[in-house]
């Protein structure tokens, strides 16, 4: 979820498509990230009520850590198949 938000994907349905996460799982994880202060919900439509998700300062600060983990994985973990 954090990767998608860092890439500029902010809407629930787009995050779901890009990650393949089941709806309930995605909702739970987004709520946990919000509770941890890494993301915030921003309403973009009142009717029907809809929200986007954005990284907070704390969430933006973790982006380099995630990028480093991705690079490590690409270098040291054998590709599947």
Image (spheres, grey):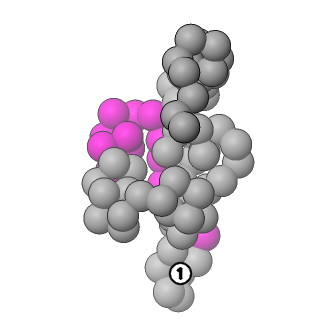
- Report if residue 36 lies within the magenta region: yes
Q: Name the residue under label 1.
A: 46
Residue occupying the far right of the picture: 8
In the rendered structure, the answer to whether residue 50 lies left or right of residue 31 reads: right
Name the residue located 52 percent from the left edge and 18 percent from the top edge.
77
Asked whether the viewer can see residue 52, the reply is no
Q: Is residue 70 visible?
A: yes
> SS for tag 1?
loop
Q: Nearer the viewer, residue 77 or 44?
A: 77
> Which quarter of the picture shows residue 73?
top right
- Mark 1 burial class by Cα count in 10 Å: few <14, some 14-19, many 20+: few
Q: Quadrant of the C terminus?
A: top right
Q: Is residue 51 left or right of residue 24?
A: right
Residue 67 placement (x, y as % from top left): 63, 21
- The residue at the point 38 percent across, 44 percent down is 34
Q: Position of residue 5 (x, y in %)?
A: 60, 45
Residue appearing at x 60%, y 70% in the figure: 44
Magenta span includes 33: yes
Please provide percent x and percent y for residue 68: 61, 14
Where does the magenta region start and end? 31-44
């Amino acid at each position: 979820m954090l990767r998608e938000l860092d890439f500029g994907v902010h809407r629930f349905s787009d995050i779901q498509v890009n990650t393949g996460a089941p709806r309930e799982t995605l909702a739970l994880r987004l709520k946990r990230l919000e509770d941890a202060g890494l993301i915030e919900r921003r309403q973009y439509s009142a009717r029907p009520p809809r929200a986007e998700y954005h990284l907070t300062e704390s969430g933006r600060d973790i982006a380099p850590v995630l990028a480093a983990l991705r690079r490590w994985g690409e270098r040291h973990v054998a590709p599947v198949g």
